[in-house]
Every structure is written in structure tokens, then in C-alpha cells.
Amino acid sequence: MDDVLISGGRIVTAVDDYVADILISNGKIETIGRVIEAPSAQRYDATGLLVMPGGVDVHTHMEFPLGEAQTCDTFESGTRSAAFGGTTTIIDFALQKQGESAKLTLEQRLAVAEPQASVDYGFHIILTDVRPEVLTELPDLIDIEGVSSFKMFMAYPGVLMMNDADIFKTMRVVGHHGGMVNVHAENGGVIQVLIEEALAQGNTSPKYHALTRPAIMEAEASHRAIRLAELAEVPVYLVHLSAKEALESVVEARDRGLPAFAETCPHYLFLNSDEYERPGFEAAKYVMTPPLRDHQCQHALWRGLKFDDLQIVSTDHCPFCFNENLYGLNRSKQLGRDNFEKIPNGAPGVELRLPLIFDGGVKGGKISLNRFVQLTSTAPAKMFGLFPRKGAIAIGSDADLVLFDPDKPHTISVSSHHSNVDYSLYEGRCVIGKVEKVFLRGELIVDGDHWLGRKGGGTYQKRSASGVF
Ligand code: DUC
Ligand code: ZN
Ligand code: ZN
């Protein structure tokens, strides 16, 4: 592979902001200097552009089974979409079936991803069945297979939910072996009561998804997850935090010095529960879990991002088409047209994280440019054991780089995105800031609107223990 020189760009990391050249050799950053002479290198002029470490999205669901449904992006389409949005590494999920070994869960998922992914990828394993034989597999998964984080659900009774005893037992093993637990924190039992009451009263439309998942049941479970993790002595990471009441639990725990962390997602920052008032079945597009909250929550989340009460912005990219005609009923929201409980829970967004957070956060004056890089690249890489290979612009790091035009306007639309999904949560929204070029380990994979990446060009990333505390 030829050397690559990226010249004259404004290099922005989580801590620095300066103009310099970057020389890439064999996919790694070789040199950074004010002016680098490298006549034989392939040269790209980045004058006027920001040069940032590739985005790291630690929460995606490509071709992922959720109940009867399956997400509509394959690893091929979903990682291409990620790349166009400036994300060069994803951490997706491998879902353990009941009775299955966790090692087999990982092997099967790797076999699906490997021939297709065009950005680098790792996995969290979602545990649903923690028989003693499964718990004994976890140390090797952490130490040898590079899976240092395990997700557990406090929601979806009878499908994914684990009871507190099993969660606690698992937390103890993971903590003892230097891993991290990710928790979906909602009180599934109480929510199920509310769902059944709503349906019994004939309330079947999408807005009842939100009405039956109240913020205080996210808060209750968040508090419980943190307390269980405290006793088990394991770092805990709350996924897709949406409610200010849940954030209060994280703040309280962190003030006590606990290794408690949380992410939020763009949809909780930019959209609110008014979307559930859309006519007909349109509101189903916004059925994700947890649901969209109110303005006060949005304000609290932005504040949390600024002051490090929240450490990461991930997408929870979990796309289902609105219409069934493209990829079939089980990849579409139409599964739940007569019953909100059957609407697949999830929304797309892997391509929009950087443009949205740059526009709303940096241009909107809510976070600094360095904090933007921290939240979207460096902190996720550190939190999940990928740093400094990923999330950094430093000598020896992978040359995963995004060249970003901070002044270019861009209108978000389903007609220009690269995901298989047939709608956008943000249709018609104009944002300032556009991904211009993306390099994955020194290879140019996105050039403006042109796709130069390769199906199968992404590589599996074994992760080490979290480097955050
Ligand atoms: N939780 C997720 O993390 N993703 C999709 C659905 C869910 O409940
Ligand atoms: Zn979840
Ligand atoms: Zn998710």
C-alpha cells in the first residue's frame, strides 16, 4: 500500500487543535509534522477541513433479530452507511439464544459480519441465559476473544429480560475478570403491566409505546443496575439513556466515585415526544426504546454531555423499514400496525451522528469541538478497549481519519442516505458540516458522494479492558 500524505488540515482531537500534515504508512499514522516532505506519497489536500479521528459508534444493530423482527441493514449496507457518516469502527451486538454457548454466539456473529463489513467492528455479547457453563466461558471471551463487555436487559420479560439475581451473578464474574457490563435499564415487569392495561382498553396506536414506558421506570432500573454493579464491583455502562431522572442516578453514583457511565443517542437530543402525535401510523417511525422524552430531558442530556455526566454519544442504530414492500413484513414497522407492542423497537441513525452532533452541539454552542471528538470517537474507544489503536490521531494509531467540512450545509434525506431503511427521523433538516473524505487504516473509503470502500474490508477488533478508570 502506498504511503498517504494528508496535508494542511486542521487536526482536531479530544484535546488538541492545530494545523499539520499527517503521513500514513501501512495503514498507521507514521508522522505528524508542520510540513512533511513525502514526494512518493499519495497526497490529499485538507486545507480548510477538520481532520478528526474516525468515529467510533459503540451501539449498532446490523441484521439483528429482535423478537419476530430483524433490522433491515445488513453488515454491508449498515457499515457503508456508517462510513458515509464518518464512523470507521462500530461495536455491534451478538445475541445469545437460550441454551446456546456464548462462544458459539460470537462465532456465528463473526461469520455473518466478516464477509460483509466495510468498516472495523467489534461485538458486545447480549447474555440471556447465564447457566454456570455460560458464566465459565466469560473469562476466555474477555481475555482471548476480545469481547470485554456484556449487555443485559432489565426489560422485555419472557424475551430478553434477566432477573436481578442472574444479573448480579453475571456482573460479579465480568467484574472479576476485568470486563464491563452494559445494561438496558427499564423496569420490564411494571412496563408489561402498563402495556397490557393499555391494550385491554383498546389503546393500540404507536403513542402508547411511549405512554407505557415512563421515565421513572427507566430511573428505577438505572438506579438498580448501578447498585447491583456497585455490590458486584464491576464497571457499569447504561445504554441509550434518555430520561433526566435516570441521569440523576448516574450523577449520584459518579459523585460517589463509582465506575458508572452512560451514553445517550442523537434522537433523544434532537427529537421529543411530540413526534408520537403524528397522524395515522406515522408515529411508528419514532418507536424506539426508551421512547422519546420531553424538552426538560433534552436539556438535561446536553448538560450531561457537556459536564461528563454522560460520556458517549452512540446511535443505537436499529433500523426497521416503515413499509413492508422493500424487505418484507418482519423488517418493517408494519408488524405492529394493529398493536403498538408488536412494532419493532428501534430507529436508524448510524450515518447522522457526526453531522447532527456537530451541527446541534458545536455550531449550536452546547459543546466544544474537542468535546465533540471526545464524545464520538475518543471516549468510546477508551471505554471499550480500542484506544489508542482507534479514537486518536497519534503516531502508531490506525489511520482512521475523517476530513470534515465545518461550513458545508447538508440537507438530511432518505433520498441521499446509504442505509437500507426507507425513512429518516430528520427528513428535510438542514445541518452545517459534512463528511468529505473517510480513511480506514489509510485507505480512502469515502470521497464526497463516492463509495470506494470494500465489502469485507473491515476487520474484527479484539478489545481489551476498558481504559477509562
Ligand atoms: N434496546 C436496544 O439497545 N436497541 C434496540 C431495542 C432495545 O430495546
Ligand atoms: Zn436496549
Ligand atoms: Zn440497541
Image (tube, grey):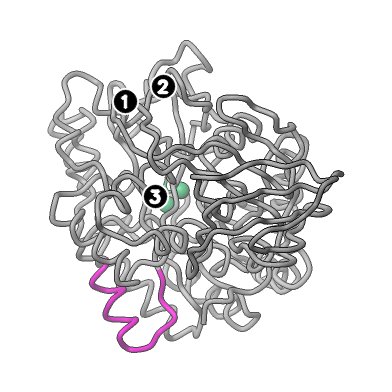
Q: Residue furthest top?
A: 325
Residue sitting at 16 percent across and 20 percent down?
279
Q: Secondary structure at mark 3?
A: loop
Circle nearer the viewer, 3 or 2: 2
Distance in Å between CA atoms under marks 3 and 1:
30 Å
Q: Quadrant of residue 250?
A: bottom left
For the residues carrying marks 3 and 1, which lies nearer the camera in this image? 1
Q: Which residues are magenta?
A: 247-261
Residue 153 in magenta?
no
At label 3, which amino acid type do we have?
A: Tyr
- Residue 186 vertical placement versus 341 (above, below): below
Q: From the image, tell me which residue sits under label 1.
A: 427
Vertical side of 224 occupied by 297: above or below: above
Using a 10 Å C-alpha cutoff, classify the residue at mark 3 as few (fewer than 14 neighbours), some (14 to 19) or many (20 or more): some
Identify the residue under disc 2. Answer: 414
Helix, strand or loop at mark 1: loop
Give the residue pinned by disc 3. Answer: 156
Is residue 159 something that shows in the picture? no
Q: Looking at the image, do the residues carrying marks 1 and 2 touch, with CB atoms under 8 Å apart?
A: yes
Residue found at the far bottom of this picture? 256
User: Does the residue tagged 3 have its C-beta within 8 Å of any atom of ligand 1?
Assistant: yes
| First of labels 3, 1 by sequence position | 3
* Disc marking residue 387: none
Q: Position of residue 252 (x, y in %)?
A: 27, 80
Residue 449: x and y, percent?
56, 25
Q: Earlier in the sequence, mark 1 or mark 2?
A: 2
- Looking at the rendered image, the quarter that the N terminus falls into is top right
From this viewpoint, is residue 272 visible? yes
